[in-house]
């Protein structure tokens, strides 16, 4: 499944298209993953992470760099897996349906330009397999932020 998705992501992105266009289609591909209820991007500007293309319910629009799982992944510059969002201090609950979460930073020239965020309606949905997959996705997408 992950290998197929990676191939589809590589095939669908086109660096001649606007960033938002590419990320929109990638969010649609990521939404094919089983047992998830939200996936999308938060893009960083100088001050905050702000909502980018996504699939799922309406989500919070602005996340400070030091807040939530997204902020943790941004600050630590690494994937953060939260098996139970209720136990993560500072978790930002956009939807009460979300029980576990994974966030992977997209890094270009040593700077976090965005994060990929996926929520699941079940506890303990994300493990090393998903981390490896999302970090591969992040690597594919990073050059689009040039
Ligand atoms: N739960 C995230 C906020 C974004 S929503 O999951 C879409 C967080 O704590 O950063």
Image (tube, helix red, strand yellow):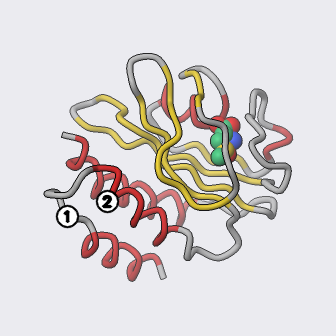
Whether residue 1 is situated above or below residue 102 in the rendered picture: below
Work out which residue is located at the far top of the displayed protein and give it. 47
Q: Which quadrant would residue 135 be assigned to in this image?
A: bottom left
Q: Circle 1: is it few (<14), some (14-19), or many (20+) Cα within 10 Å?
A: few
Whether residue 75 is situated above or below residue 137 in the rendered picture: above
Total labels drawn = 2
Q: Which residue is mark 1?
A: 14
Q: Secondary structure at mark 2?
A: helix
Q: Which quadrant would residue 4 be assigned to in this image?
A: bottom left
Name the quarter where the C terminus is drawn.
Answer: top left
Q: Could you tell me which residue is drawn at 50 percent across and 30 percent down?
A: 49
Asked whether disc 2 touches disc 1, contact meaning CB atoms under 8 Å apart, the reply is yes
Q: Could you tell me which residue is drawn at 45 percent across and 58 percent down?
A: 134
Front residue of 77/64: it is 64
Q: Secondary structure at mark 1?
A: loop
Going from N to C along the chain, the mark reached first, 2 or 1, is: 1
Front residue of 30/4: it is 30
Marking on residue 22: 2
Whether residue 146 is situated above or below residue 138 in the rendered picture: above
Whether residue 66 is situated above or below residue 28 in the rendered picture: above
Q: Could you tell me which residue is drawn at 55 percent across and 76 percent down?
A: 32
Q: Could you tell me which residue is drawn at 79 percent across and 44 percent down?
A: 85
Residue 88 in the image: state x and y as whole percent.
77, 36
Q: Is residue 19 left or right of residue 63?
A: left
Q: Circle 2: is it few (<14), some (14-19), or many (20+) Cα within 10 Å?
A: some
Figure quadrant, ligand 1: top right
């Amino acid at each position: 499944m992950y290998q197929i998705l990676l191939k589809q992501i590589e095939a669908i992105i086109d660096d001649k298209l606007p960033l938002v266009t590419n990320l929109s289609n990638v969010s649609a591909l990521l939404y094919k993953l089983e047992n998830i209820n939200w996936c999308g991007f938060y893009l960083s500007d100088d001050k905050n992470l702000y909502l980018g293309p996504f699939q799922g319910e309406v989500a919070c629009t602005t996340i400070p760099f030091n807040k939530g799982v997204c902020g943790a992944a941004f600050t630590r510059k690494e994937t953060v897996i939260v098996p139970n969002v209720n136990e993560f201090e500072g978790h930002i609950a956009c939807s009460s349906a979300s029980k576990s979460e994974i966030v992977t930073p997209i890094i270009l020239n040593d700077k976090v330009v965005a994060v990929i965020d996926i929520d699941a309606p079940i506890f303990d949905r994300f493990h090393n397999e998903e981390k490896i997959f999302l970090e591969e996705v992040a690597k594919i997408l990073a050059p689009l932020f040039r």
